[in-house]
Every structure is written in structure tokens, then in C-alpha cells.
Image (spheres, coloured by chain):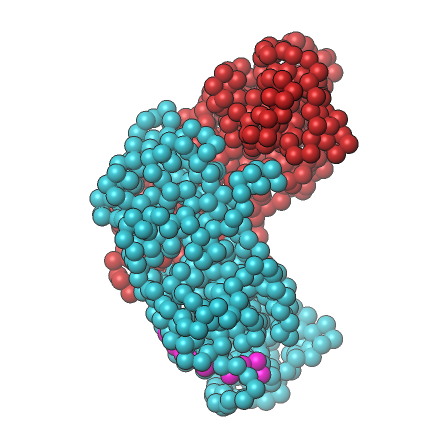
Chain colours: A red, B cyan
Amino acid sequence: MYGKEITKVFDEKGIKIWDTVRIEKSGIYYEGIVMPRTEAGDENTLVVKQKDGYNIGIGIKGAKIEKIASSGQKPEPTLPKKRVSPGLSKVSLLYTGGTIGNKVDYKTGGVYALTKPEELLDEVPELAGIANIDPQKISSVASEDMTSSNWAKIASEAARALNSGSKGIIVTIGTDTMHYAAAALSFMLEGLTGPVVLTGAQRSSDRGSSDAFQNLICSAHIAAKSDIAEVGICMHSTSSDGKCSFIRGTKVRKMHTSRRDAFKPVNSKPIAHVDVNGEIQYGSGYSRTGGSSKVEARTGFDEKVALIKAYPGSDPGIIDYYTGKDYKGIIIEGTGLGHVPNFTEDRAKSWLPEVTDAINSGVIVGMTSQCLYGRVNPNVYRTLRMLSAAGVVYCEDMLPEVAYVKLGWLLGNFKADIAKEKLNKNLAGEITGRTLYEEFTD
Amino acid sequence: MYGKEITKVFDEKGIKIWDTVRIEKSGIYYEGIVMPRTEAGDENTLVVKQKDGYNIGIGIKGAKIEKIASSGQKPEPTLPKKRVSPGLSKVSLLYTGGTIGNKVDYKTGGVYALTKPEELLDEVPELAGIANIDPQKISSVASEDMTSSNWAKIASEAARALNSGSKGIIVTIGTDTMHYAAAALSFMLEGLTGPVVLTGAQRSSDRGSSDAFQNLICSAHIAAKSDIAEVGICMHSTSSDGKCSFIRGTKVRKMHTSRRDAFKPVNSKPIAHVDVNGEIQYGSGYSRTGGSSKVEARTGFDEKVALIKAYPGSDPGIIDYYTGKDYKGIIIEGTGLGHVPNFTEDRAKSWLPEVTDAINSGVIVGMTSQCLYGRVNPNVYRTLRMLSAAGVVYCEDMLPEVAYVKLGWLLGNFKADIAKEKLNKNLAGEITGRTLYEEFTD
């Protein structure tokens, strides 16, 4: 329920949820249906659904509210008419769950996930003017609960849709682990014939400040009209509305808990920028359509891979823990250029013996940097050379999360020796070719 | 040794290491003593020590080299004359190890650590004009090998020096874990009477592109002249020379493996900017000198604390591993607003049962976000509320590394119930007071 101030106005004017009201604030008029307060919404911000279907949040302070019509009943959702515009490309929208599909349950006030992806399309009527969207529900999984089997399902469906005439794919997915999924799809999908665009929302679509609409519209433009044949994430470029970035799936990371522009390219630049009107500005060096006529989905994934962090005082016994559970691969987030504690005063905190044992027992150990930006390099310091000599694979400028996903995918599809060999070779844009010398003399 | 091209010129002109040469390149003349190639140095970049004591690296391509004088012998280092300028403040320089103190061993070509901090001062004659620097060697530990006992030693010495008349402290330290150390000192030092400035170098001081000199000079300005009474890191603001940022010790992170401007404030702004001429531009909201007359070092630290990352497919058994080893605290780097896998298809991958067991057995579990930027928030989604209800402490906008250091420090100095209570209360600027509502409506 709304807070005291709004409740007071409601009581005075006899306004109820679902009534139609007119609001004046700072000389601007708004008209719409009073929506229930969302669970995470501010208690002093009134949310109304405007005639164009969009919700808007208006701070109560300084706002004048008049009731126009009573309703007292939740309006029935109008499902979109199925229509196919002959001039537009077909785009498959794979709905998997996440905030973009969350709505408030008007009975309980809680957030619930949409059951039909069509409801999402209903919220964004502009989409019908960009492409013939073919919605399909893959799952209804929260981002933190996504696993490799969810990624495999998305990859298979994306391949199937592209091979059945879709120009491009939109995947709506929760943002928390969207970049893990983007990396997985980047490795799983081979011979792409069009763009695979992951998108979502940092705020659910019934909130005034939701980013869902712009993200969907921009994603549709990329999916329907671009010549890109890559997997990437399409979300807000800045915290203001207007533009989205399309960032390569292996070079992107969620870098903010809540901002709309949370997704940033790391050691990379966006493949493209796109605005809500469909204007696409391309960057350089991306894979273009036309190189392939059939998409293959190679969806194997070995779950016996771990991602661990090395830090002052960290316990190298964690390596033994995983080898004891028959893990086949470990990615370390080292410090700086790819360090782990080694010549510590307390020798029990030295990682090199455990790392060496693991490698000797056949475990693949990859090194990345918790700095995130930059490149690991085993050639500068003694401990680094020792780790490298022991067989640690230095993963260049690959993100830790991407290295984790890559190693799981490699071990799920190739023999261990091939997997090890491929780990620090570029397969899907995850490693870029900047040389050591350039890196050091910026 | 240098590469083919330089070796060829050396052979032609009879030039040996330690000879004095004159070099012309692009119309500019350089003169100095030929230095051995550093281990990590480029093989085509000739390094000469100029008369002013600074080394410069010159790419061989297009350079004309003439020998001026033979030497063939390593020049003796000239240790600085001990001098005290009456008008200048006393600043203690605590030398702990790291790249800033690395030099090339001219016999072996390997990198070695300085044995005397005076050698470092010798390299930067400007320091004597800024403060009466009192150098002291605390340790010679590489950054990745630093532990809480090293931090405790630095804290004790810093307190002692401040209580014995030093205006401020410079701590030279390796960059890889500098931000962990800065957080530790921020908690360990109470009642600061002056600035404690951590600094270091991304490239060692005998390299042409070294950032050591500027970082030391700017740190000396902050330590000697500012009215700041906080622990912070003073390193390059940008990849160009000229300015350094002084960033609060609890709000800073190494964000690049090799760039000079690797240290960035997270969820914060720098306390100050300072240029090599000593001009200090202050930000807002820092602790000023004058509030205290005596510094206390509370250096306890409980090593039975772990920092772990949650990600798709991650194994919650890792919690059992640590509780089985009698760990008292665990900081989780969750996804997004502070999530862990919970309602996964494979229930063995659900973290909530293990987290609940750990908390029930007395372990303190803190939640941070691997996004790094932003703030965790247990009020938005169901799983978050369940974790919070189970007793997980949501650590606001604290960095994961800072939360780890803080929990180790808390458990080393307070009873568990007090430690838990203090974990998400601001003690040293690690939590900022931006409200949830602001965060969501940027």
C-alpha cells in the first residue's frame, strides 16, 4: 500500500486503486489508472497507467490529484492481435524469465513472473512496427537460478529458430547472470546467420522508471535490421534514456547492481550503438551475416568446473576440495597480472603446491585477473613464471566469468587435452590481440 | 639482453652496458649511461640513465646512437645526504616491498627488491623539497604475499610515527593487494592525526614509463601538506602524467592489471586530486586533522574468514568446507543485488540450506555484490528476503574485498555478536548513506 501522504489524498478525494485520475505537477498534466504500489516501489510515488499503456511514477509532493472516473476493478489485459506485416523480418523472442517479465500481483502486492510472453509484447506496441515477433516461452527462471542446462535449451532454440527463417533472436533473461549466459551462447552457437540479442530490465516493466521498453525496442532493431552475426547484450548505454549498446557476449559484465546502464564492455568496445528510432552506429571488427547458412548448437557443458578467488590470507586448500570432488577445471581470479599468494610468511597459505598437485592430477587450471580490466601476463615476476611453468594456463584478457563458462563448455565438448589447448586461444572474441608491449606503454 | 637491432648497433659502435651515449631521435637529443635491459622491458627499447638521475626508454627505430665515453662499470649508487630542512614537515616513509622498490639486478638481469628505502629516495630528489622524509623498512614482501600480519605491522609503525611527530605517513607497497591493505589500515588505525598515504608503482622505477616518481611526489604533498586524517591510496588519476587521486582506503579497487591509473574509487569520489607541483583540490566529506591527538592501532585480525563467489552452477558445499575448518566468517560475492543460486533445477546447487546451516552454527555470513558498483538490497526479491531472514548480513555498498578485510578485523578484535552487529554499520567510510530510493531512481 502507498504511504501516509498518498493515502490521505485518496481518503479526501475518495480515490481507489484502478480509478482514473488526472494529476497536475509542475505545470504538467498526467492522466491514467491508479495502479497498486509495487513491492519495491517508493511509498510516496503514485504509479498510474497512462492511455498509451505505459506506467508512470509521480512523486506525491506538489502534485494535485483529481478523480475522473471510478472503476475499482483491475482492467483486463488486452492480448495483442496476431498480425504479420509482410515487409518486416521475423524475429524470435525467447522468453526465459527475469525482471523484464515480472509484474505486480494485484491481489497480493507481490512480484510474479509473467506466464505468457505475449503479455510482454502487449506492453510494447512499438515492437510490431519493427519486426514480426514470434514469442516463445523457454523457461521462467530467475537469473540467479540459471544453470548450464538453461543455457543449452536457449542455444538449441535459437539455432532452431535461425535455421527456420528468423532473421535474428531476442532472448529476454534476468540481468544478474545475463553475462554468463551471453558467454555460454557465444561458445555454444557456431556459424551464426544473424544476431542473438540478450536483453532484460533492471526495473520491472510496471515501474515508471522501467528500462524494459527501450531495451526491447533497441534489441528488436538489432535483431531485425543489423548485419551482425554475433551473440551480445543490448541494454541502456547510459543512465538516461535514448540509446542502447550492443556488447559482445564474451566481453561484457554487469558492473552495477541497479543502474539501467549496468552492462559495460570490458577490454572491448560495443559492437554497435542503437537508438529507439532504429538508427544503428556500428563499431569495427564484428562478424557479419553471410558467412554461414546453418547454425549449429554445441551445447555440452561440464559442471565440474569452479571459479575461485585468490586474495591475501586465502586458503589454497580450496583447490584440494575441488580436486577431491573430481573437478576437471578450475579458473582462478588472481590478483594483478595473475598472482596467487606464494611466498607468504605462513607457508600453509602458499598456493603453488596445491596448484601443481591439481595440474599433475589432470585438472586444468586457468588464470584470470580480479582487476577485470587488462591482461594477465606470466612473464613479469618470478611467482608468475613458476605458476606458468607448473602448467597454469594464463587466459590473456579474458574475464574470469567468461573463462569459467568457456572451460565448462570446452570440457563438455572436447577431450581434456584439446580443452586445455583451446582455453587461451580465441574462439568467440573472448581474447583480443593487443600485444604485451602495447599494454605496457599505453 | 637487448634484442637484435640494439645489439647490432652496439656491435657496430663498440658500445657496452654502462657506457655513456648520446642519442638523437626525432630531432631530440638524449645523453646518459646505457642501462641493462630490464627483465620485463621491451627488447627494442634502449634504457639510459640521464644526468638528472632519471632513466628514459628510447625505441631503437629511427634513433641515432653515438658513444661518448666508455665505462663498463656499474655506477655506484649515491645515497642521499641526510638533511633536515627546518621549514618542512616530517613524513615517515614505510617501505614494505612491491614494484616501486624493484630494480634490475645488473649482474643477473633479474628484478630484485631494494634493500634500503634510501635508494628509493635517491631516485626522487624532489622529495627533499617537500618534506623531511624519514624512511623505514618494514618488510620486503611482494603484494600477492601480503597477509594480515604485514598489515598489522604497518599499522603499528604508522601509529608510532604519527604519535612521534610525523605529520603524515607514506606507505610504499605492492599494487596487487594495495586496496586490501588500505582497507585493513582504515579499520586498524583509530583517531588519525594525519594522512596515511599508500602508494606504489605499476612499472618499476628503472623503467622509462615508470609511474613511481609522480606517485611518490604526489603522495609526499598529501602526507606533508593536506589536512586529511584518513587512510587512502595515491596513484595516477589518468594514464597520462600530471595528477594523482587520493582515494579513501575503503572505497578503492585495483581495476586494471597494468595501467598507471589502475586504482579507481568505487561508489565514491576521490578525497582529493593532487598534482606534482603540490596543488591539492579537495573533494567533500572527508575527516580532517585536529579531531584527535593520539592514534591507536587496533591490529587484531582473525584469519578464519573467507571470501567466496556465487555464480551459475556454483557449489554451495564450499560453505560446508569452511565451516568444517572452523571458519567464523564468510563474505559472499553474490550476483546483482546480492543473490545466490537458490531455486535451481538441480537442488544440490541451492545455497540457502548451506547458508542457513552455517549461520545456525554461529558463522557470520555477509553479502556483497560481484557487480562491485551499486548496493546490495535484500528487500526486492523473494530469495533475497529468505537469505536476509536466515541471518545473512547485507553489506550495503561495501566492496567484497573490503567486507572480507572488515570481517577479519572485526572478529580479531570483538566478540562475534558485536562483530556481526558492526559488519553493516559504517566505521571507516566503507558504507555510504545513499538511500535505497535514490539508488533506484537515478
Q: Is residue B290 visible?
A: yes
Instruction: Pinpoint residue B209: horizontal percent, then vertical percent.
Output: 58, 69
Which span is picked out in magenta? B128-138
The answer to whether any part of residue A158 appears in the image is no
Residue visible at 40% across and 70% down in the picture: B295
The answer to which quarter of the image holds residue A148 is: top left
**How far from the left and from the top, in percent, is residue A282?**
70, 38
Is residue B131 covered in magenta?
Answer: yes
Q: Quadrant of residue A417?
A: top left
Residue at x 59% of width, y 11% of height = A73
Q: Quadrant of residue B162?
A: bottom left
Q: Looking at the picture, does residue B386 appear above or below residue A156? A: below
Number of numbered markers: 0
Residue B337 lies, in percent from the top left, at 47, 38
Q: Residue at x 51, y 70 (%)?
A: B289
Q: Is residue A6 above or below residue B118?
A: above
B359 vs B404, left or right, is left
Residue A204 among magenta residues: no
Q: Residue furthest right?
A: A27
The foreground one among B77 and A73 is A73
Residue extending farthest to the front is A12
Name the side, left or right, on which B243 lies relative to A379: right
Q: Picture coordinates of residue A87 (x, y %)?
A: 74, 16
Residue at 34% in and 38% down: B391
Location of the C terminus of chain B (image quadrant):
top right
**Side (left or right) of B40 relative to B30:** left
**Nearer-the-camera pick, A367 or B125:** B125
Asked if A438 appears above or below B442 in the picture, the reply is below
